[in-house]
Structures are given as C-alpha cells and as structure tokens.
C-alpha cells in the first residue's frame, strides 16, 4: 500500500515536471534538477573547486551532461563524490571549444565511449568537420602528383576530431534535439573570441524556459533573446554569464536586461559570471537569486503547480503539491529555496 502510494506520488510528480515527451520515453527514475559538478566556488568539502564548468541536467526523464570541466582528474573525482553515474546519460553537450568546458570529456568517454555528444559545428574545429572538396581552387594543368588527391578528390573532405571514434553530432544552427529541448547556437562577436560558436541548452518546461549556459561568449542577452523566441517566459538561467572582467556599467546593463526586459524569474549564476556580477544579480533578484556553487543541486519545477503550466499533464492535487514541495526541499542543501518559499508565503499573508 505504501509502495503503491509512493509510486502514484512519483508518477504525479513526473507529470508535473515533465515536458512534452513521447509516450514511453520517460526514464524509470525521473528527477528534475540541475547539479553543479564543476566550478571554482562552492561549499561541498567532498568536491574540488577549479575554474571551469559542468552540470548534470536531469529533466523529463532525460539525463544530460552539460560541459565537462577543466581537468579530467578533478572532474572524475567530483562526479564520483556526487555519486553521478555517467553510464546512463542520454547525451552530452559541449558548449564550446574552450578547455575549461571540455577537458573532462576523456573521462566521460572512458566510462561511456558511445554516448552522443552534441558540439558546435565549426570549420576545422577539434570536434571534426567536413567540407565539399569544391572549396579549394583547382589547377588542371598541373601533373597529377602535384594535385591534391591526384586530381580526383572525394566529394566531401572529412577533418578529424581530437577524440577519434567519439559519437559527435555537430550543431550548426539552433536545433530542437528532443521534444522541448533546444540547443541554441550563436556566434561570439567579442574581441578575442570572434567567430567562436557556442551552444546553450533551453528546456521548455511547464514553468517556462530553463536555460543552461556555458560561458555565454555570444552575450547572455543574445542567448536569452533566442530562448525567449522559444517561450517568452524564462523560468531560470543557470551557468556562466561571462561578465567576469566586465566593468560596472556593462554588468548593470546586463542585469537590467535580464530582470526588466526579459523578466527572467530566477538566476543561478556560476562560472565566468564574475564576483561583482554575483553581487549585482543578488541585489536585483533577491530571493530569486539561487545559489549554485560546486555541488549544489537545484530542483526544477517548484512553480509548476501554478496556473501558468502548459497543461499537458493531469491537474495536480493539493496533496501531490505538498509532497512535491517536501521532496524539492530535500534537494535544497543550503535551504535557499526553502527560505525563499517561507518568505514568499509570509509576504502573501
Ligand atoms: Zn569559454
Ligand atoms: Zn568558461
């Protein structure tokens, strides 16, 4: 009886937090949360702080590893400290080609060599690429031994990946890779990272878009603008906002854009967001600033019982909501969300 009611509750919770997934696609255990596996700040003594980013995104029965940190050994130790099983990933996303987001990939491949890896498509990039052989100029007057491929090149020329044999799928433009899960592909225009392509993960949940960003080289505002085109309701942004060396006026402009232009509900900044930006976001977002240091697990969908949900699942009963809140609280090691809820409740009374 007890087992049965637990099953019913878990099923209700999964329907609450799920996105529009095809029937039968949900995994047996369906958590909805983001766990920070790599960053240079945090409070978990069992994990090692280092510059870089990685997060395990669990939503709608999918387990997605977003970026892999800066050092394979530290990444492996942090993954093990958190008890994360990398064998059961649905896919990996590599946001961009900077090593502080990719260096743990060797470890991922050592435990899960065939996992699908989404990475940005770049000409001659380290994830491999291809070009039609028509791209280079020909000189048919030359003898064959002076001509590329003896004068008869393959139609498509393939260029190798730094991880031979890895199961890369290269993303050129913004693509929905699973129902409700979109990789936003944008190119940086900033000095120093011009032409760098970066992928951000936008998950359209019943609460609005949950947006996971790696380093935001194309600009956090541009990424949020692209996410808002999927669903103008931005529920949460987690990851690096790339304002680590930005002056105060640039930080202030970005904060205003997130809060007032895009009306972002909550932020969970990390990695290259920058210390002064942490302070500015905390000031602007107050309780809606969610601490997300190394080891933090952020439950998703705390708001999903409201009338703002997309309405694909059955309506939730009050009991289910209470249970969901209780479970969500358990995943809130620093009590931040709990404190937020108590304050919200207090202000409504
Ligand atoms: Zn970067
Ligand atoms: Zn970075």
Image: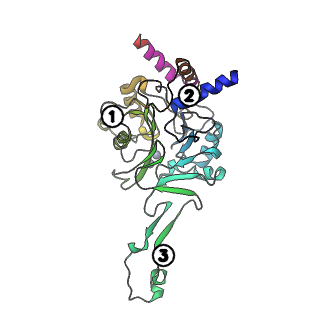
The Cα–Cα distance between marks 2 and 3, rounded to whole angstroms, is: 53 Å
Residue tagged by mark 2? 13
The Cα–Cα distance between marks 3 and 1, rounded to whole angstroms, is: 48 Å
Instruction: Name the residue rendered at 50%, 68% in the picture.
Output: 158
Instruction: Name the residue rendered at 44%, 23% in the picture.
Output: 306
Q: Residue 313, how many percent across, how many down?
A: 50, 31
Q: Nearer the viewer, residue 12 or 86?
A: 12
Q: Nearer the viewer, residue 29 or 189?
A: 29
Q: Which mark is residue 262?
A: 1
Say above or below: 339 vs 149. above
Q: Quadrant of the N terminus?
A: top right
Q: Residues within 10 Å of mark 2 (few under 14, many from 20)?
A: many
Mark 3 within 8 Å of ligand 1, using the beta carbon: no
Q: Residue 299, how many percent across, how many down?
A: 53, 30
Q: Which mark is residue 154?
A: 3
Q: Nearer the viewer, mark 2 or mark 3?
A: 2
Q: Secondary structure at mark 3?
A: loop
Q: Is 188 in the magenta?
A: no
Q: Which residues are magenta?
A: 327-345
Instruction: Name the residue rendered at 63%, 34% in the picture.
Output: 46
Q: Which mark is residue 244?
A: none
Q: Is residue 278 visible?
A: yes
Position of residue 8 in the picture relative to residue 227 (left or right)? right
Q: Secondary structure at mark 1?
A: loop
The Cα–Cα distance between marks 2 and 1, rounded to whole angstroms, is: 28 Å
What kind of secondary structure does the magenta stretch mostly adopt?
helix
Q: Residue 138, how many percent across, how many down?
A: 38, 80
Q: Residues within 10 Å of mark 3 (few under 14, many from 20)?
A: few
Q: How many marks?
A: 3
Which mark is first along the chain, 1 or 3?
Answer: 3
Say above or below: 40 vs 104. above
Which mark is first along the chain, 1 or 2?
Answer: 2
């Amino acid at each position: 009886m007890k087992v049965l009611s637990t099953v019913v509750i878990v099923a209700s919770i999964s329907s609450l937090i799920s996105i529009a997934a095809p029937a039968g696609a949900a995994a047996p255990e369906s958590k909805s949360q983001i766990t920070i596996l790599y960053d240079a700040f945090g409070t978990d003594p069992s994990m090692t702080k280092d510059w870089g980013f990685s997060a395990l995104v669990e939503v709608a029965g999918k387990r997605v590893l977003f970026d892999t940190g800066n050092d394979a050994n530290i990444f492996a130790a942090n993954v093990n400290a958190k008890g994360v099983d990398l064998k059961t990933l649905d896919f990996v996303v590599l946001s961009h080609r900077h090593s502080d987001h990719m260096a743990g990939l060797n470890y991922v491949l050592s435990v899960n060599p065939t996992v699908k890896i989404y990475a940005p498509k770049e000409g001659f990039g380290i994830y491999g690429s291809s070009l039609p052989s028509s791209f280079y100029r020909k000189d048919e007057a030359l003898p064959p031994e002076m001509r590329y491929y003896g004068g008869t090149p393959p139609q498509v020329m393939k260029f190798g990946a730094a991880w031979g044999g890895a199961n890369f799928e290269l993303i050129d433009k913004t693509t929905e890779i699973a129902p409700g899960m979109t990789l936003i592909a944008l190119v940086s225009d900033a000095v120093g990272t011009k032409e760098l392509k970066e992928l951000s993960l936008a998950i359209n949940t019943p609460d609005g878009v949950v947006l996971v960003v790696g380093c935001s080289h194309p600009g956090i505002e541009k990424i949020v603008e692209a996410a808002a085109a999927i669903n103008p309701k931005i529920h949460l942004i987690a990851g690096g906002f790339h304002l680590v060396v930005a002056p105060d006026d640039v930080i202030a402009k970005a904060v205003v854009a997130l809060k007032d232009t895009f009306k972002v509900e909550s932020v969970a900044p990390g990695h290259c967001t920058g210390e002064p930006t942490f302070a500015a976001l905390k000031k602007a977002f107050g309780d809606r600033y969610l601490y997300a240091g190394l080891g933090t697990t952020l439950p998703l969908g705390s708001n999903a019982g409201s009338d703002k949900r997309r309405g694909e699942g059955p309506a939730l009963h009050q009991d289910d909501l209470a249970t969901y809140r209780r479970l969500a609280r358990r995943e809130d090691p620093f009590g931040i969300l709990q404190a937020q809820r108590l304050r919200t409740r207090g202000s409504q009374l």
